[in-house]
């Protein structure tokens, strides 16, 4: 008889979140010139679910590695994510004054320091992986650096942001362009989270393929659910104004597919994502639960 | 009888410059979304003496390595240098419209793309070192990545730019602050050029010490000579407006020491720098000639 223990995802996520917060807090000390370190920490320690580092840690453990092997890379992924938010929020880009209910970095420190804080975090991400990764062969650490760089550079996040900027205000954005933007602006970094965890644990090239697919599928499902919630959820549930995309006449998945078909596609993607992890049995529980969590959320 | 061949520096520099230009040209291809790659290439291929890559290549060869071992790092150093110029020129920073007689990146592509081109180049520098370095043990390549990151991050170039911005318009800037700015804004990356070349070639920790000193000394001498030329050279000789620092009431070495003492200090620094290379005999010829070149220049 097999007894399946119920996996407590919310407890798992909150425990991992605490571990990541503590590691990030230790990663950057405030020294002279204080302004830049304070600015970097202001955005890095501004909360959030820390889903990217958690994906990296969970994949590393699932493939047979340890938390300790992956923690520097997990922190680096959050530094890169934070850097992309700081630069995206700038007046020259999306011009946002608030993020997660707090003033954006440039509203507190000025545009000049915000640009430099982003540069500092991006740089430190690579330094942190290269200098702090322990008990991992150096070749693997180099591969992780390549993964992170491809995810954030012109072939990843930066390229996605460029296409997003170019599509702004256009009414004829195709679903291919929409998909390019999401795959690069959010998908590439999520994929790097999963792949870097796998590489650190010693996953073979063949093992990496289904893990890439898992990450791509949950990334796309996440975006579709986001678009649907913007229409169906109330502002109170979202904690931000609902209906923003409609007002901005932004191309979204529901605008192409309708709400019901969008939901069906998201569910199918989550099912496909979970199927990629069959080989890992019970060790896949955290990644399976994270995939389910994406379509189950209501805000 | 020993015949000392006269070392032809200008031929050496122009040959190396061609090698570096060709390698940089190969490093970045223009693919979709074209704008970002064109913007990165616009600034990367905008000329310049390529002194940083040449220092890296020369040190690697002097310590016993090959050009081929150091070329990816040499290119990465120029990508990082270029990124720092693109971000420094932005309206939110120094707000410069021209650099080397060409429109600055943001004047051609807009502030948003210029920020992203800097992010793209910075990221690609690390990717290029990690992915392209051949015939070097992975541990050394990781050490090089740490060196580059320390030189560009908050403990290097970014920190120097922060202090420079904070000192702007102040009449009470101390020589310690002036020195901090130069050591971080220009010195740190020059030191990384020399050290990364040495690390790639397998230099021991003990070997690295005098090479650091060499780089710090020529970096400071370069800055002092720059400050002196701003006062003594004509605009025609400089190719830019002379006397800019005086007009801007900027703290410079001559403003603390006077012109004659500044020249004496620069000469002493170059002599000290050259003395650090005694152990390398004739193999040090390029680095010795580069040190002399710094004080001999008139523009």
Image: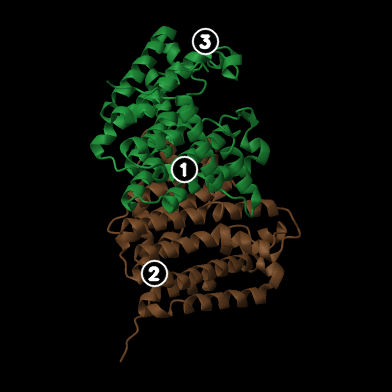
Chain colours: A green, B brown
Residue A183 makes an appearance in the image: yes
Which residue in the structure is indicated by mark 1?
A76
Distance between the alpha carbons at the discs numbered 2 and 1 = 29 Å
Q: Is residue B166 left or right of residue B188?
A: right
Q: Position of residue A131 (x, y in %)?
A: 44, 53
Q: Position of residue A106 (x, y in %)?
A: 63, 37
Farthest right residue in view: B171
- Quarter of the view holding residue B36: top left
Q: Position of residue B269 (x, y in %)?
A: 56, 75
Farthest bottom residue in view: B1
Residue placed at 32% from the left, 86% from the top?
A: B3
Q: Taking A96 as reference, is B277 above or below it?
A: below
Residue placed at 67% from the left, 61% from the top?
A: B177
Q: Name the chain letter of the residue that bears numbered label 2.
A: B
Task: Tell me the quadrant of the picture where the C terminus of chain B can be found.
Answer: bottom right
Instruction: Sort mark 3 into few (<14), some (14-19) or many (20+) by Cα contacts within 10 Å.
Output: some
**Marks 2 and 1 belong to one chain:** no
**Marks 2 and 3 belong to one chain:** no
Task: Tell me the quadrant of the picture where the N terminus of chain B can be found.
Answer: bottom left
Q: Disc 2, disc 1: CB below 8 Å?
A: no
């Amino acid at each position: 008889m097999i007894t399946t223990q119920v996996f407590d995802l919310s407890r798992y996520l909150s425990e991992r979140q605490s571990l990541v917060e503590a590691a990030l807090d230790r990663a950057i000390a405030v020294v002279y010139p204080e302004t830049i370190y304070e600015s970097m920490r202001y955005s890095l320690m501004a909360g959030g679910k820390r889903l990217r580092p958690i994906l990296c840690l969970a994949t590393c453990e699932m493939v047979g590695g340890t938390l300790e092997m992956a923690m520097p890379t997990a922190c680096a992924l959050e530094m890169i994510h934070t850097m992309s938010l700081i630069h995206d929020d700038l007046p020259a880009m999306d011009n946002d004054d608030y993020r997660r209910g707090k003033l954006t970095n440039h509203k507190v420190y000025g545009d000049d320091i915000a640009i430099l804080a982003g540069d500092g975090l991006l740089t430190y991400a690579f330094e942190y992986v290269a200098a702090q990764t322990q008990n991992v062969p150096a070749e693997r650490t180099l591969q992780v650096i390549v993964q992170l760089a491809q995810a954030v550079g012109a072939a990843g996040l930066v390229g996605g942001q460029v296409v997003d900027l170019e599509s702004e205000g256009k009414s004829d954005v195709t679903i291919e362009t929409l998909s390019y933007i999401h795959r690069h602006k959010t998908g590439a970094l999520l994929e790097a989270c999963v792949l870097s965890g796998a590489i650190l644990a010693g996953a073979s090239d063949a093992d990496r393929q289904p893990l890439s697919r898992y990450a791509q599928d949950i990334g796309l499902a996440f975006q579709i659910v986001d678009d649907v919630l913007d229409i169906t959820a109330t502002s109170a549930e979202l904690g931000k104004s609902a209906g923003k995309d409609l007002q901005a006449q932004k191309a979204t998945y529901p605008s192409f597919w309708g709400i019901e078909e969008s939901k069906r596609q998201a569910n199918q993607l989550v099912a496909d994502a979970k199927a990629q992890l069959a080989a890992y049995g019970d060790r896949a529980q955290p990644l399976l639960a994270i995939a389910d969590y994406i379509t189950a959320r209501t805000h």
